Image: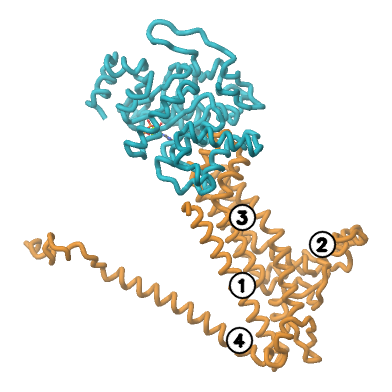
Chain colours: A orange, B cyan
Amino acid sequence: MSTVTQAGPAVPAGSAEALSERRPLGDRGFQVLALAAGLLVLVILVLIAISTTQQATSWFTTEGFKGIFSTNWNPAANKFGAMTFVYGTAITAVIAIVLAVPVSLAIALLLTEVVPRRRARPIVYVVDLLAVVPSVVWGLWGILVFAPWVQHIYASIGSALGGVPVLGALFGPPTSGASFFTAGLILAFMITPIVTSLSREVIATVPAIDREGAYALGATRWEMIRGVVWPHSHGGIVGAVLLGLGRAMGETIAAALVIGSSPVITSHLFAPGYNMPAVIANQFGESSGVFRSALMGLGVMLFAFTIIVNVFSRAVVARSARRMRGA
Amino acid sequence: MDHPEPKVAETELPEPTAQQQPREAAVFERPGAEVFKTKNVSIYYGSFRAVTDVSLDIYEHEITAFIGPSGCGKTTVLRTLNRMNDLVTGARVEGDVEYRGASLYAKGVSPIAVRRRIGMVFQKPNPFPKSIYDNVAYGPRVNGEHKKSRLDEIVERSLRHAVLWDEVKDRLHKSGLGLSGGQAQRLCIARTLAVEPDVVLMDEPCSALDPIATGRIENLLREIKSRYTIVIVTHNMQQATRVSDRTAFYSVLRDDKNDTRTGVLVEYGPTRQIFEDPRDSRTQAYVTGRMG
Ligand SMILES: Nc1ncnc2c1ncn2[C@@H]1O[C@H](COP(=O)(O)OP(=O)(O)OP(=O)(O)O)[C@@H](O)[C@H]1O
Ligand SMILES: [Mg+2]
């Protein structure tokens, strides 16, 4: 029963070794596991990049750089220019961001700064619920319900603004329910929850004592938000927006259903268009040879774009974190 | 040059110099006008009564110290003096809080106007994540001052008043977050002085600072008190005796039957009297260190 004596320290308490680090086995095991999992993800990512790039080489060797920058996409004539879809991706992503970001920020500020926490919770819940609607459901709703309903609105806006310079070029006819704008709008719906919840989290980390510092100087709520919340959280918010942008660029099924599937470059936002994920989804099944390779090439480019956006967003967040530490 | 009137458009509060209260006689040595008069003030957080029945007058151009054991409600009382507790959901004030003859909690009084007049320095230095210059200019900008030359002037003067100018004049456009704790606290004081308040409330402004920085801030308080009225919460009794003219001692009233603790104002008077000749045995015990 007197096993207590055996439980003494193996190292004399006074020696230097007594202070040296001896991490428990479980701790080290967890570290190894975490490292392995991280490496595995990286390896899978690299393998995907390599194999898709390989699949895309025959497109690249037949078309060269011209393929990337050409706007001529005509599978029947073996012409595979990517630019039309790059343009469409950019346009739809920009529309999505322009529509989603102000709304997301307004909701996030409302929830953190205006509505009392108790009453904010159900709203948070509803916004988060938007995120669980499957992409294909958004797409079907978009094409079956939203597009027919909105096409009259597009048409009347289009005829009203048709003659106006600039606005006419953007919103004038031709108009169609399935269009760049509808795709951007559906994408905006889809990225609003993530941008909102990330922004809300960033804003919630603004220390209460900083807010009080502003209020104590006689700031109104809006002045407090501009003077304290914004400088504290703009880096994180930009990160959230870029993450949303990455999503909007890569989102496939919903865009494929509502964009109108018309490979043209036009400034008319209410006109049917096409973007990279949509053309891959729609045409992959019927493709072969160089055609398929070209679609793979589009996939590689999309992959590269989203990685660039992600790296950039991380850099922005890291830079603002550094600034916050007073560097 | 003396203290220009704060620019507050929407206020119903009287201007600081507008109304001289009749002077209180006898007990107090040389009181100026009352800046605050509180009568039977009780403060609640929800249903919890944190402080009860506080009646005290705070005088112009004096430094008033609040002392007392932790949890007795010093911060709570301080924060009702500039309606900072409006920001706490569930916080509620009963009784009268008068500021220069007008009720602070009357309908139609804007807490924003109140806080422009009655500034606050917090326990933990809380510079904004902006440059030193923009920290100090924040208040004046919020008050509608946007002229560069005026702002330059205000920033320099406020930083000089807060005895920080020489240390930061070459790095005004560097972040305020890069300052040491003592410098950051002086920046926060400068920021408060920049709006030229009538009253400065300070909640343990030196508790995070070393003795040298503390000494600087105490000197600063003595220097600026001819222009402002200062209320300071402190746990440091030497500090109270060093800087304050008047001291309020708070304590906790325990009710074991209902299991409640309520803060009360035990004794209020000239600092010398509170420390050398306390009337209440609880004050005596506290200032002689026989009670937490
Ligand atoms: N926001 C709040 N919500 C609920 N109760 C609070 C809040 N702030 C303070 N209290 C309670 O009110 C009482 C008084 O607190 P207060 O912070 O005013 O004490 P204090 O004298 O400043 O103490 P300390 O010396 O530790 O700063 C305490 O019982 C505290 O728990
Ligand atoms: Mg306190």
Do marks 3 and 2 share a chain? yes
Q: Identify whether A317 is placed above or below B156.
A: below
| Quarter of the rendering occupied by the C terminus of chain B | top left
Q: Mark 3 or mark 2: name the one nearer the start of the chain.
A: 3
Residue labelled with disc 4: A53
Q: Are marks 3 and 4 in contact (CB under 8 Å)?
A: no
| Quarter of the rendering occupied by the N terminus of chain B | top right
Q: Nearer the viewer, residue B247 or A221?
A: B247
Which mark is on residue A126? 3
Q: Amino acid at mark 3?
A: Val
Of tags 4 and 2, the one toward the viewer is: 4
Q: Mark 4 or mark 1: name the one nearer the start of the chain.
A: 4
Q: Chain of mark 2?
A: A
Q: Amino acid at mark 1?
A: Thr
Side (left or right) of B238 relative to A139: left
Dot 3: element: helix
Q: Is the C-beta of the residue carrying label 1 under 8 Å from the nearest atom of ligand 1?
A: no
Residue labelled with disc 2: A150
**Identity of the residue drawn at 59% across and 15% down:** B18
Of tags 3 and 4, the one toward the viewer is: 4
Residue labelled with disc 1: A306
Mark 3 and mark 2: span between their CA atoms? 24 Å
Q: Chain of mark 3?
A: A
**Identity of the residue drawn at 36% across and 20% down:** B247
Q: Chain of mark 1?
A: A
Q: Is the C-beta of the residue carrying label 4 under 8 Å from the nearest atom of ligand 1?
A: no
